[in-house]
Image (tube, rainbow, N blue to C red):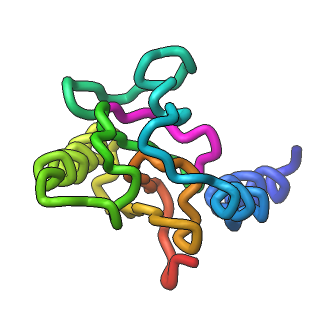
Amino acid sequence: MNQHQNRVAILSSHISPPVMASEKEAALAATPSDDSPTIFDKIISKDIPSTVVFEDDKVLAFRDITPQGPVHILLIPKVRDGLTGLSKAEERHIDILGRLLYTAKLVAKQEGLDEGFRIVINDGPQGCQSVYHIHVHLIGGRQMNWPPG
């Protein structure tokens, strides 16, 4: 690989691909449920492997398998408690919502995202939510753009 090809490869690795139609289709096809286990429940129970970067008694943080940046981590509450999406939040969820955001700050520091990062919570079909277990996306390691999408 010559110097130009190497430079293009390095630059390309820092450009996030757009949301794929399949992700949008998955979000539109997803069905909210308080009873059925989600893929995140299976990750919490260790039935599905993940690359965990943080875990305590309330929150699990792991690397996204389809990263939208050099760093893309999902933070989830270990207990769903009816919190399938942000629009379903009730007053009883205040503590876990705050815990998720504070943990995102800790993980961002741990990941060296000192120059900034983005927090995303997708909600509902038009918000492109495909897993109905609230989750926070922590994305960083590159320059973000506005508007986001």
Regarding residue 96, the answer to whether it shows in the image is: yes
**As rendered, which of 129 and 1 lies closer to the eye?**
129
Q: Position of residue 47 (x, y in %)?
A: 53, 15
Q: What residue do we see at 44% from left, 33% from top?
A: 62
Instruction: Tell me which segment is drawn in magenta.
Output: 60-67
Q: Is residue 45 left or right of residue 88?
A: right
**As rendered, which of 1 and 121 lies closer to the eye?**
121
Number of marks drawn: 0
Q: What residue do we see at 69% from left, 67% from top?
A: 18
**As rendered, which of 149 and 146 lies closer to the eye?**
149
Is 55 magenta? The answer is: no
Q: Residue furthest bottom?
A: 147
Instruction: Identify the image quadrant of residue 8.
Output: bottom right
Q: Residue furthest right?
A: 1
Q: What residue do we see at 42% from left, 43% from top?
A: 34
User: Is 53 drawn above or below residue 76 in the view shown?
Assistant: above
Regarding residue 72, the answer to whether it shows in the image is: no
Q: What residue do we see at 21% from left, 53% from top?
A: 97
User: Is 144 drawn above or below residue 100 in the view shown?
Assistant: below
- The quadrant of the image that shows the N terminus is top right
**As rendered, which of 35 and 83 lies closer to the eye?**
35
Q: Position of residue 43 (x, y in %)?
A: 48, 25
- The quadrant of the image that shows the C terminus is bottom right
Q: Position of residue 32 (x, y in %)?
A: 51, 52
User: Is 75 drawn above or below residue 25 in the view shown?
Assistant: above
Q: Is residue 7 left or right of residue 106?
A: right
Q: Position of residue 92 (x, y in %)?
A: 12, 51
Instruction: Identify the image quadrant of residue 21.
Output: bottom right
